[in-house]
Amino acid sequence: MAPTIYVMYGSATGNSQHIGTSLHASLQLSTPCVELNKWKDTKLASDAGEDGDGAKLFVVCSTTGNGDSPENAGRFIRFVKRKKNHEEGVKPFSKLQYAVLALGDTNYSEFCAAGRLIDKSLANCGGSRLMPIAKADEAVGLEEVVEAWIKEVTTSLACSEASCDNDSPISPEKTLSPPAHDPAVCDGIRIVKAVNPNYTDRVVPEDEIGTLVMTSSSNSLSSLNLPPPPPSDLALLSTSLKSANDSWTHTSSDSATNYTANKPFSSKITKARYLSGQVLEKLSLDAASVSKLTLEQKMEKLKGHGRRVLELEVTLPDDFSLEYSPGDSIGIIVSQSDASVSELIQRCGYGDEYTGNDGVKRSTRSSLAKLDVTRALKKRHLVGIADSATNTEERNCLRFLAGKKGSATFESFIAKHSVNLLDLLRLFPSVKPSLTLLLSLFTTVPPRYYSVTSSPLYHPHRVKFAFTVVDYEAVEGSGRRLGLATGMMEASVLGMLVGGEAAAATLEIFPKHSKEFRLPASSRFPLVLIGPGTGVAPFMGFVEHRKLARQERVKTTADSCAGMWRGGFELESGDIGVGSDDTTDFCSSEKAGPIHLFFGCRNEDDWIYRAEMEEMKAQGELTGLHVAFSRKEEGKKVYVQHRMKENSDQLVDLILKQDAYVFICGDGTSMGKDVMACLGDIIGEEKVELLKEKKKIVLDIWAG
């Protein structure tokens, strides 16, 4: 009897249901045993075990809201998350092969969170991945990823491993050092051969690679009347990009929002400081020498200085037209650097102008500055770019990387090292894509979002935010690379950091309001704040806001209760039978609840906001400060969840008896799941789910 194939969908709006039922119908034409949407976990586990090694599961799951799972998939997700099912000897899906298609929206921090959770949990339960998880973004269109995934699923079922395996598994430790140099072979092909010794140059048939699907948002870019490029020192700025269908446009539910991604506010940087890292000590630069450097030269000097976190303070409009609350984020518009655009124009031989679809001539430089050409390439990019290679071997190599047989090589070469378009042009020199092709293949550069670290009560016309500078080793031959936004922001304030004049650059900003990640209306509720790394940033604003709100309330009540008017009558001492301290408490209505902060980092050198946290603790603003260091002692890693378990009795009292709000913020690679699992161990999984539904446990998790 043929092994059963299971197709499951977790759907809230119908997209996943449509895809799942379509896949089910398609598979039924060629496979006799296909079952649809059997989410009853234990039955599936039993059936998978009986089916032996051939059972396969294909999951299509959307993410609702900011990281929630569809209701119809909830039971299954709770089952695969259960730690008991991850133990050796228990793993219920040890004979199951699976693949996951996750649907999400990159406008939310927890992009494809439900699908990613299922993918990881199935592996923890013993399942074996048939292929890497596919993530389709509703912000730019689902079709391309969905069609490619379905094609890969049907193809994988149609062929045997022996006939399809041209791509050996790659050890994660394998380096990309190329073999002895052969001048007749380009660097890109040499690296592919080093990564995959089984690779052989051959013509890749069309049915092995996806079809080219142009992006919807970038198609309109060629007809936009884009502005001229900004000066080099202002390359971080992006003037308005008023495309009606930009995929990343933020629309707030707050009708009072005056600034958006399409209409940002030009903000000045007023303060800058390092929260961690010893960059300035290593650089040994003074203000005079920094003032002579271009933005690109500053970025070169800043490369390779390890992990560091910066905090910036920027201006807000004087007319209060850009409002924010603790828990909100600031969006920053970004464009490509002049150096990157110049290299692209030179390598591809583009002219200064091109004619758009409407017949109007436009600046090539301005258009390229808006394209996301420094992002890590996807397979769909290689599909489109491959045919622009004039060298046959290079073209075949790119088509191999874009095809299903090159998936492991693609992951170890392109994905692992974040190879971008400029890297590809250096590695495969015969590749010369047309400008029209690039305008069709690449979307516009999306904004970057950073949590605010201040309270609006701190200053009515200032806001602070923090970020980790992205600094990593790129693919062989490209050296180190800084993040597009974080690298430019760091370089633009280098003069301020060394004690020189204020930064000349400004930032184009707009608010991104959070519906759920915000303080409760009443300060009487206790707060449990869990934020490793830069995840602690919004909590600095939370604590500051409570402190300043309390001080403002005390001042107001002191004015109204200490010998001042109430309904036209002055209150003299003795008019009420309580002391002055009690009078203040009486008028300020309620006592603020305790605040416990759980923070984690690698070691004490990475402890951002240390002085502020310790001062908050000393002043009583923080009731508890619980810090974990993951690399302080050799062989011993301590994370925030360890500190949570040490304080489990107190957490039970705070959450279940004192009605505390729990906020979790940080990198979603594993932290969010681990913290939620820890909370489940402390107060029970059912309580966790109930409190999440009541918005008493709130997460702000972003992809790592």
Image (spheres, rainbow, N blue to C red):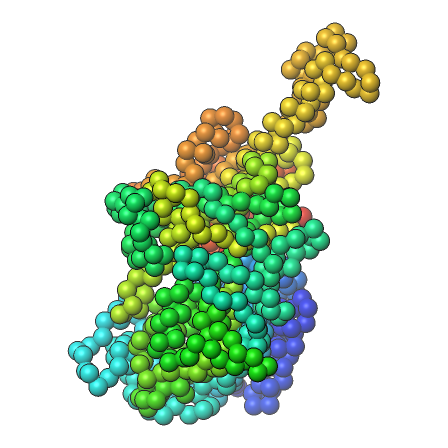
Q: In the image, 596: left or right of 200?
A: right
Of residues 214 and 22, the one nearer the viewer is: 214
Name which quarter of the figure residue 72 lies in.
bottom right
Q: Judge whether 455 appears above or below 667 on screen.
A: above
Q: Position of residue 680 (x, y in %)?
A: 54, 48
Q: Position of residue 189 (x, y in %)?
A: 28, 81
Q: Residue at x 42, y 53 (%)?
A: 489
Q: Residue at x 31, y 49 (%)?
A: 290
Is residue 145 visible to us here?
no
Of residues 439 and 27, the one nearer the viewer is: 439
Q: Residue at x 82, y 20 (%)?
A: 567
Q: Position of residue 52 (x, y in %)?
A: 47, 77
Name which quarter of the figure residue 559 lies in.
top right
Q: Residue at x 63, y 28 (%)?
A: 552
Q: Judge whether 254 appears above or below 590 on screen.
A: below
Residue furthest to the top: 574
Q: Position of residue 462 (x, y in %)?
A: 54, 41
Of residues 290 and 169, the one nearer the viewer is: 290
